Every structure is written in C-alpha cells, then in structure tokens.
Image: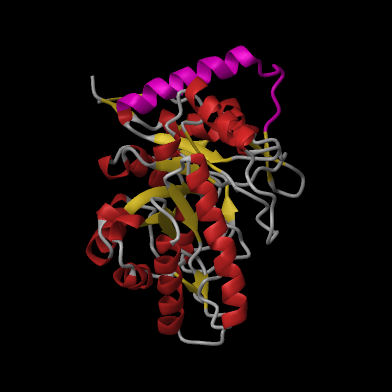
Amino acid sequence: MTKCSPKNIKRGPENQLLITDIFTSNNEGKATVKKTRCQETNTDTDHSIEAHRNLASRCLKYVGAHVSAAGGADKSIENMVKIAGQSLALFLKSSRSWSAPPLQKSTIDKFRENCKIYNIDYRKFCLPHGSYLINLGNPDEEKRSRMFSAFVDELQRCESLGIRMYNFHPGSTVGKCSKKESIKYISDCINEAHSRTDFVITVLENCAEPKCVGYKFKELSDIIELVKDKKRVGVCLDTCHLFAAGYDVRTKDSFDSVMKDFEETIGMEYLCAMHLNDSKGQLGSGIDRHENLGLGNIGMECFEFIMNDHRFNNIPLILETPDVNNDEKIYKKEISMLYDLVEISK
C-alpha cells in the first residue's frame, strides 16, 4: 500500500497526525484559514476536481461538503465543483423558514443538467439536509402537524429533483414526554410521509445532545424498528455528534468498537452517509459544536480510519466544519486533506 502524497499533514513526536499550512491562529487563539500569495484559478479547480474524481473512483470515497444553494438548487452543484467535491449536502429551502415558493421546472432542469455536465450522480451522492425547524418528536399535536407538513414538502422537493436521500435530525421530547413516546411520533410521521411520496429514503442523523432522539444508537434502532418500509430508512453518522454523545472514535480500537456497536444495534446496511466533523467539545460533553478537521478533540486519526475503511465506500462523506471566511474555500482544502489520507494499493 502507498499513501497519497500529503501536502498539509505531518506526523508529530508521538506519531499523531498534525495539520500544517492550512490553518493559523489569530490573536485570540482562534483558527483561521491561512492566506496564500497566489490566487486560486479556475484551472486549479479543474485539476483538483479531476484529481479527486480519479481518487474517488479508486478508493470509492466520495467526499464533499454542505454548500450553498442560494439562487436555486442548481447553484449547489456549481458550488460543489468550486471546492472539488465528489458529493454534497444542501438545504432545499431556507432552513429557518416554514414556507418557500415551489420548485420551478427551470431549476429542476438546470440542476439535472449541471449534474450531467459535471458527472455527478445526484441519486447517490446528493444528501439534502432537513430544516432546523422540523421536530417530529414534539408531543404537541398542532406543532407537530405543522412540522410534518414541512417535512413532507422537503421530501417532495427531493423527488421532484430526482434525489434519492434526505437527511434530518429526528427530533426531541422538548422536555414534555418520554423518549419512547417521541420515538413513536417520529416513526408515525415517517410512515405517513412514505405513504405520500414514492422513493426518497429518510436518513436519520445521530445527535450530540442527551435531550435529542438519536443520542444513542438504540434510539435510532427503535425508530427504524417502527418504520414499515425498511428500504426507505437509513442513518447518517456525524463524527462530532458521536464524540459528544460519548462514542470514542479517536483510536483504531475504540473506533472499531463504536462501529461494532453500530453494526450490532442498527446494522451496517442502514448506513447511508457520514458527516465528517471534528469537535470543539470533549468526549461525552453533549455539546454540538463542530470544529475544523485536526483542530478539535477528535483529531485526524478518526478520519484516516474512515478514508481507508471499506465500510464507508460509495456513500456521501460530507464536511460540515466551520467556514470562518464564509466562502466555502476551507472545504476544498479539507477535502484534499482527506484524500491525502487514502492508501492506494500498488
């Protein structure tokens, strides 16, 4: 095996992976993107996306990020290309608004055209993220009904675009019911939503906070158990959320132990995607605060394991790390970092 030449990753004195060149610290000790003298060109992006596409086809790891869809879903594909991503997440409408105008046929056509131009299989590697307003576990029937309508609308938008998967946070009890009751509300909503749509897979995301359903694998398993159409439900694992919930993914042994627990409790057949994030919080802190790769309390080894483990082949691997400059350029750097960790057979 030979590892792709790392440009921004080095080994420390105890053989831990270190990040260099990409980040620097400001006077407040906060990580910022290191400025370079050379301005990036379209040619640089073309070379990067081709290099990443070739690597993805060899190692079967499809790394991307949550990108902006401002101006229409079709713009998300263009933004994915700018960061040389091989997969993407996006919001199908404002994540902070209940309503949105219907998708226009021109947007749908342009989205599919862009996917064809840039050779993106949107059925496999596009993973829209649900609105933050949706909480299907809320025991208040009136509020849950409104959230359910928004949920179905987003699933229907996926199907209009031809997107096969939809990722969302299951919800929380809001301190007004048991988790068992909340799980029943969530699964009932999923079953009803499936009856109103044709094919989109509802992908449950694990959560960082104890009050949220999905904090532990058993809670996700309990939802899946109550879903009638098992082919239309899956799981997205977020590394920051795992760590915050007490799942230690920092060493090979502990990482494998976590995945064994996932396999035994839920089943690898339900793993549809991953969110790759470091964590500002400590192990078991219950704090959902993402950090840039290698700068948090998880460290780079976890991501090296993922990039070289066949269990994560052919699924979207999505970055949701802080974008301090709000220009998404950090994602291109972190995508390159991840591909630099890949070991390729000679």
Q: Is residue 184 visible?
A: yes
Magenta residues: mostly which secondary structure? helix
Between residue 64 and residue 99, name the one nearer to us.
Answer: 99
Judged from this view, the residue extending furthest toward the right is 27
Q: Residue 51: say if magenta.
A: yes
Drawn side of residue 145 relative to residue 309, left or right: right
Q: Quadrant of the N terminus?
A: top left
User: Looking at the picture, how far across and down is residue 76, in whole percent?
Assistant: 60, 35
Drawn side of residue 316 relative to residue 221, left or right: right
Provide the residue span drawn in magenta: 34-58
Q: Residue 33: say if magenta.
A: no
Quarter of image, res 305: top left
335 vs 91: above or below: above
Protein image colouring: secondary structure
Drawn side of residue 6 relative to residue 328, left or right: left
56 vs 72: above or below: above
The residue drawn where x is 50% and y is 47% is: 158
